[in-house]
Amino acid sequence: MKLSKHYISLFELQNYEHAQIQYMYADLNKTIKLIEKQVLCDQLLKIEQYDTKSIFLFIEFIKNQYDDEKLNIIYNIAKMVYQNKFNKKFNASKIFQNLKNELPLELYDYIYKLMINTKPNKDFININFIEKIDYFKKPFILLNNGNIVFLNHSFFFVGFYHVILEELFRKNIKSIEQGKLIEEFAEHQLEKNNINFIKGEKKYKVNKQQQSLLKIKSQELESDMIIYNKENICFFELKLRTLINKSKGGNCFHILNDLSESLLKSQTQLNKHKRYISKFNEINFRSNEKIKLDNRNIYKISVSSLDYQGLHNPLIFQILLRNIPGHIIDKTKDNNLNNLVDNINQKFKDFSDEISSEETKNEIISPTGLSNTFFLNVFQLLFLIDKSKEKRTDLIDELILTRNIRLDQFDFYYGYSYINMLKQHQKRL
């Protein structure tokens, strides 16, 4: 009976096969309801939106930034797991037995507790407790028979990413500094792969006349990352905000608040860069580098941490962005939630005012106006950098490969592989 209840609940949750059409014709309230359901589906039926190679390269990069014994140990274990056969379960008990023999007991206990989940999902009772799922936060699981196992790369290698971030936090390296590390890693990969990007500090002044013309108060603007080729310029903004546990449980206010702090906040900043270069044709950075528009296309890319999963799909986030101008979220009877509502409405207003400017208002009005807008997680970006190297193509070409394609799955990697397969097939014809 208990299993039957779970099955019925899952069936009801999955039963929205016409969701794509629903998104296309949804107003803001309907879009929010669909996003709630998408988040729940992602948690229960999810396909993780990262690739193992990108996570391993990031761990390697972090290890090289610090002369730290614990980070070295984490990296060495991650390397052994990475080199093991992909998605092949293996017994890691010997790895930890060797560590126990080699390390001081206090250090071994520290690594053991950091990396091994002794009671995964212990508070997950049924699908009404989705936010309690925690198996992915550590790479290894302790079985009842005492064995320590790594189950597979697709679901558990991300545990190394969470462990690295946790260790950085314990070293008092907080979110802002971690964001800078991710920016540095992305630029390291760009440089290694000979991709054109603006180097150094990417701040630039906005004088009083420019402020007046653009109707902005900022005396200075800054972009996290900028890449370019002969036809295109891409501005990137990185926000490490993830979906918090309450959001994963399907709470629409927390979901919108997380999206406000990641997608909306970054798109508001990105639009300022677009309007500035569109108006004045060039940007002169503090680093003495400059970039000219020269009639190139401009793309705006929001980059998040993990956990947004299906919400990275263009159908979802573009419809949400298009529905926001002119709308607010109604207050509730819960004062704690109303604090979130106030923040959401402020981010709605900031985005609405910015995107509705003369230079960019057509992006909201035109059905294809937001095709220059992307929402990726950091490992999807790193995946595209790696693919551009592997295929000897331009990164921006890889980025825009799937921008106008709507498939029947909200999975970035499936969509990329499918469209890439079609492109390869066309070349052979």
Image (tube, grey):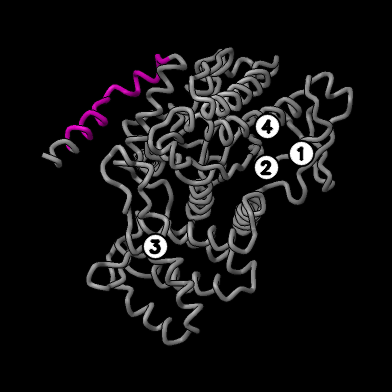
Can residue 382 be seen in this snapshot?
A: yes
Between the C-alphas of marks 4 and 3, the distance is 35 Å
Q: Nearer the viewer, mark 1 or mark 3?
A: 3
Q: Is residue 23 magenta?
A: yes
List the residue tagged with mark 1. Answer: 291
Residue 226: image tag: 2
Q: Amino acid at mark 4?
A: Gln
Secondary element at image label 1: strand
Q: Is residue 182 above or below residue 64?
A: above
Q: Label 4 crowding class (10 Å Cα cut-off): few <14, some 14-19, many 20+?
A: many
**Is tag 4's residue or tag 3's residue first in the polypeptide sequence?**
3
Secondary element at image label 3: loop
Q: Which of these two is toward me, 337 or 400?
A: 337
Secondary element at image label 4: helix
Q: Is residue 134 above or below residue 78?
A: above
Q: Nearer the viewer, mark 4 or mark 3?
A: 3
The residue lying at 70 percent from left, 18 percent from top is 359
**In this image, 212 relative to 71: left or right?**
right
Q: Nearer the viewer, mark 4 or mark 2?
A: 4
Q: Quadrant of the C terminus?
A: top left
List the residue tagged with mark 4. Answer: 269
Between the C-alphas of marks 3 and 2, the distance is 34 Å
Q: Position of residue 198 (x, y in %)?
A: 72, 46
Q: Amino acid at mark 3?
A: Pro
1 and 2 marks in contact (CB < 8 Å): yes
Between the C-alphas of marks 4 and 2, the distance is 13 Å
Between the C-alphas of marks 1 and 2, the distance is 9 Å
Q: Please provide the residue range marked out in magenta.
A: 7-26
Between the C-alphas of marks 1 and 4, the distance is 18 Å
Would you identify the image quadrant in which residue 90 lies? bottom left
**Is tag 1's residue or tag 4's residue first in the polypeptide sequence?**
4
